[in-house]
Image (cartoon, rainbow, N blue to C red):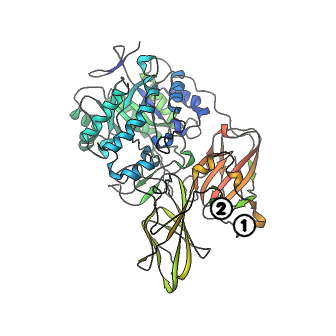
Amino acid sequence: MTDFTVGDRDFLVDGLPVRLLSGALHYFRVHEAQWDHRLAMLRAMGLNCVETYVPWNLHEPQPGRYADDDALGRFLDAAHAAGLWAIVRPGPYICAEWENGGLPHWLTGRLGRRVRTEDAEYLGHVERWFTRLLPQVVERQITRGGPVIMVQVENEYGSYGCDQGYLRHLVDLLRGCGVSVPLFTSDGPEDHMLTGGSVPGVLATANFGSGARDAFATLRRHRPAGPLMCMEFWCGWFDHWGSDRAVRDPADAAAALREILEAGASVNVYMAHGGTSFAGWAGANRAGELHDGELEPTATSYDYDAPIDEYGRPTEKFWRFRDVLAPYLDGAPAELPTAPAALGTPVRAELTDWSPLDDVLEALGDEESEGPVPPTFEELWVDRGLVRYQVRVPGPRRPYPLSVQGLRDLAVVYVDGVRAGVLSGENAALEEPVAGPAEVELWVESLGRVNYGPRTGEPKGITGGVLHERQFLHGIRARALRLMAFDEEGAVAKVPFRTVEGGAAEPGAAGLYRGVLEVRGAGDAKLELPGWRRGFVWVNGFCLGRYWSAGPQRGMYVPGPVLREGANEVWVLELEGAGAGVCLG
């Protein structure tokens, strides 16, 4: 039996000191058929360990209803086969630039600020989830011949709260579920974060992107003994829609990595390979020092300017990191694995079938609800997707401003069937006033739930009301179109499509478009959507995620295993104005 323990200064395997050279790779951001390649790339960079989060909301979309919740175990088996140790960070909160920080919308919608505290109802849900999840971890611990060497308690809790009873409850829950390997916490190297997020008797680690000596000095003030580890070495960063692409100079990142290792510390490179937030699971941030400002939705690509890029290819940063890590290995780094196949021949296709949003909603949407005030996404049990709100402006009355109070996050507005504008922000008004009587439709989309800071878990949709002048409009009809509806087998076949030439109300209309890409030489590819504005795209029923002309992301990564030789069906759900076709290259 192999034993992994935390010593006074080192991590120990069967009593012998080891240095953890780990890299973050999220199994849920990589197509399962490509796990082996990405793990082999970690080995080739010189790493001996892989770290992953576990997104609760992905695996329990509704209370007691689970989806692919044994994926973690399969990933850990793949890591073991690749010759890597594994660090598991099960949450329940994970941040990770993931929708709602991994917390289920049905949980935060009900409990609000009571999540991530010692609230009994919240802890009951956590206990149920951990009881189901953790056997996959327990049976794969290093003491049982598996790869798992450490498990995290919560995640960066000191950046959020200081409920020590909550953290201690999680420690007891992990131990009670059979986790016997060392536990740890990770927080920023600041006094308030380390005091709020660490637990006596549990290893504390630090997260940072530079300044290792100062960071470890702060950690040592709080923990005089125990091995030093940077649990998140931020070697790059993530992108927000509408912002410039985040990049970090490879030489600068390599120098920061060298400083960590020269301090005698272990490291987890975040991210070693970022991957992609498929299916609209990307989260969002709030701007400002206090993370309570304007919404900043995160792009679909989670490339992170990592040493292994979104397509699984080594970058200059990869080679520089490999050189820095080499002196700390027992032997030479592993050889690079064979690169995944790339698309053989670029192809372009027109999307010849179209259905307006109202027809798509009729075919795939939820039942309509009606009430005096607009329901939130949480009240409608919607995680990802959009909601059509309908309301009547009474009349006769003169033109007044029409506004939305508490809008989260973006609404395309129609007045008497004619598009009147696109609204965004907490309180927004149409440019042109509206006279009554009039029928108003607002197609509201969540751009990703906040995943970090005090506004994590805030509701989506219309959280206030629709106003004409300063008067609330009542009698709101609401109907949801969930992204999950497109996952059901044969669902899209129920949509009443028509040919674009003969049925579109206007060039570039919103709606669901369908077409076929004829592929020769299937492999990894990029899907371009020239002229398309904003929406979601699927290839052979696999949701690549959100696209948006706001950038900085241009094109969508298409994993090779999603494509097949010959005909490949493409669906594009365009919410503002369609382009002229799609290109695969």
- Horizontal and vertical percent position of residue 136: 47, 27
Is residue 440 left or right of 15 when viewed as pictured? right
* Mark drawn on residue 504: 1
| Whether residue 116 is situated above or below residue 42 in the rendered picture | below
Q: Can residue 155 be seen by looking at this rendering?
A: no
Residue contact at pointers 1 and 2, CB within 8 angstroms: yes
How far separated are the C-alphas under marks 1 and 2?
Answer: 9 Å
Amino acid type at image mark 2: Gly
Question: Which mark sits nearer the N-terminus, 1 or 2?
Answer: 1
Residue plotted at (78% across, 65% down): 501
Q: Is residue 149 found left or right of 168 in the rendered image?
A: right
The total number of labels drawn is 2
Please name the residue shown 59% across and 52% down the image: 554
Seen in the picture, residue 370 relative to 385 is either above or below; the reply is: below
Q: Secondary structure at mark 1?
A: loop
Q: Secondary structure at mark 2?
A: strand
Label 1, residues with CA under 10 Å away: few <14, some 14-19, many ≥20 = some
Of residues 436 and 449, the one nearer the viewer is 436
Which residue carries the number 2 mark?
A: 511
Residue 339 x %, y % = 63, 31
